[in-house]
Image: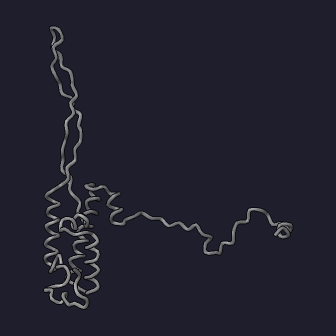
Amino acid sequence: MAAPKGNKFWMLRSKHGRDKLFSTPELLWEAACEYFQWCDENPWTTRKAIQKNIPVRVKKGKRTITENQQQTEQQVSPVSRPYSLMGFCIYVGASTRWWSSFRDDCINKNEEDFLQVIARVEETIKTQQFEGACVGAFNANIIARTLGLADKQEIDHTTNGKEFKGFDFLPYTPEADKLK
């Protein structure tokens, strides 16, 4: 059964809307530091197949000779995990859309304390990615695209500011004007 028209049931609510994910800037920074620490403590691992020659003694008749046999071993090594805004949002149980709207709301409401923490989180993530790419820990091409870095050259293919009036492929003949 539907509620009666003109009801005021909504006024009986103790609160309206959803609670903020972070009520203070300090809680936001604390969560970011937890995420950064988690990334540092939980690196990715890479596996590489390594071929090794192992000497083996083999009896051939009365003689014992040494032959090399190849064995493949798996080498597992830790690789640092890059910080990312998407990873941080997943860590705190939010989405990147939430982060964008949260930042926009802080800008609109002029919440300077939150804006400083938001900038600090984003700058920490970008710095770690950039520095990791510089030392070869991360793929420099991927990080450059992620950070919006590009080696651009602008080439002017115009007519140096002059108006383009079309191509003149054929020489002008007065007969061509008569055909129009």
Instruction: Locate the N terminus and report the quarter of the image it occupies.
Output: bottom left
Q: Is residue 175 left or right of residue 33?
A: right
Q: Position of residue 117 (x, y in %)?
A: 20, 77
Quadrant of res 89: bottom left
Q: Position of residue 80 (x, y in %)?
A: 20, 56
Quadrant of res 9: bottom left
Instruction: Locate the C terminus and report the quarter of the image it occupies.
Output: bottom right
Q: Residue at x 17, y 70 (%)?
A: 32
Q: Residue at x 13, y 78 (%)?
A: 26
65 vs 141, nearest the viewer: 141
Looking at this rendering, what residue extends furthest in the front direction?
Answer: 1
Q: Is residue 174 left or right of residue 103?
A: right
75 vs 14, nearest the viewer: 14
Compared with residue 153, is residue 100 higher up or lower down, i.e. above or below?
below
Q: Position of residue 68 (x, y in %)?
A: 21, 24
Q: Residue at x 26, y 57 (%)?
A: 135
Compared with residue 13, is residue 166 higher up or lower down, i.e. above or below?
above
Looking at this rendering, what residue extends furthest in the top direction?
Answer: 62
Quadrant of res 70: top left
Q: Position of residue 3 (x, y in %)?
A: 22, 84
Q: Is residue 133 left or right of residue 71?
A: right
